[in-house]
């Protein structure tokens, strides 16, 4: 599989994603459903800490896709959803967590839609992420 990232001449080059991504020769895709910071008992691990929630979600998702033999480098797309309680500073910190998470990726994924919503299904949840992987 070959991935080529593309930037846009009128937009900033960002450390978090490419503005476009061409994927050639992919034979398998793995979709990780939107996940939040909670355990099997629906207990939120990082109360009022969206940065900690994002970090936990990325680790949790990695455990999911690793079961099928995928790695961080196979991520081709991420979708973001944060609640209105997440500040601009925290948003930047979440993006920094993501940049650190993918720092060793050969090609950065494309960024999906970043949504800012009133709330998630549980009031303690502030961040929800989902990823698509290919190989």
Image: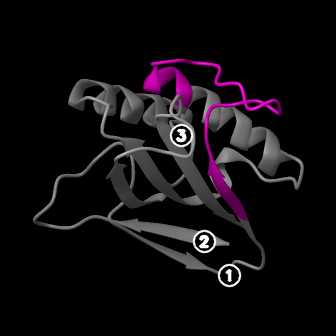
Residue 25: mark in rendering? 1
Q: Are marks 2 and 1 in contact (CB under 8 Å)?
A: yes
Q: Is residue 67 magenta?
A: no
State how far apart marks 2 and 1 are (Cα). Answer: 7 Å
Of mark 3 and mark 1, the one earlier in the sequence is: 1
In this rendered view, identify the residue nearer to me: 6 or 132.
Answer: 132
Mark 3 or 2, closer to the camera: 3
Res 59 seen here: yes
Mark 3 or 1, closer to the camera: 3
Residue 101 spot, x, y in % from top left = 55, 34
SS state under label 3: loop
Q: Residue at label 2?
A: 2
Q: Which residues are magenta?
A: 31-53
Considering the image in quadrants, where does the N terminus appear? bottom right
In this rendered view, identify the residue nearer to me: 72 or 85.
Answer: 85
At a point 80% along the width and 39% down the height, the residue shown is 63
Q: Main secondary structure of the magenta part?
A: loop
Residue 77 spot, x, y in % from top left = 52, 61
Question: In which image quadrant can residue 86 be found?
Answer: top left
Q: Is residue 50 magenta?
A: yes
In this rendered view, identify the residue nearer to me: 130 or 44.
Answer: 44
At a point 86% along the width and 53% down the height, the residue shown is 69
At a point 79% along the width and 51% down the height, the residue shown is 65
Of mark 2 and mark 1, the one earlier in the sequence is: 2
State how far apart marks 3 and 2 are (Cα). Answer: 17 Å
SS state under label 2: strand
Of mark 3 and mark 2, the one earlier in the sequence is: 2
Q: Residue at label 3?
A: 102
Residue 90: mark in rendering? none
Question: In which image quadrant can residue 84 be found?
Answer: top left
Considering the image in quadrants, where does the C terminus appear? bottom right
């Amino acid at each position: 599989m070959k991935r080529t990232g593309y930037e846009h001449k009128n937009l900033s080059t960002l450390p978090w994603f490419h503005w476009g991504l061409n994927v050639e020769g992919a034979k398998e895709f793995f979709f990780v459903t939107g996940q939040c910071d909670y355990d099997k008992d629906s207990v939120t691990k990082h109360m009022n800490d969206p940065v900690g929630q994002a970090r936990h979600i990325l680790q949790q998702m990695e455990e999911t896709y690793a079961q099928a033999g995928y790695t961080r480098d196979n991520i081709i797309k991420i979708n973001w959803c944060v609640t209105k309680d997440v500040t601009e500073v925290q948003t930047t910190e979440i993006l920094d967590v993501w940049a650190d998470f993918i720092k060793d990726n050969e090609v950065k994924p494309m960024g999906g839609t970043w949504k800012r919503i009133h709330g998630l299904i549980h009031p303690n949840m502030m961040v929800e992420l989902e990823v698509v992987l290919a190989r």
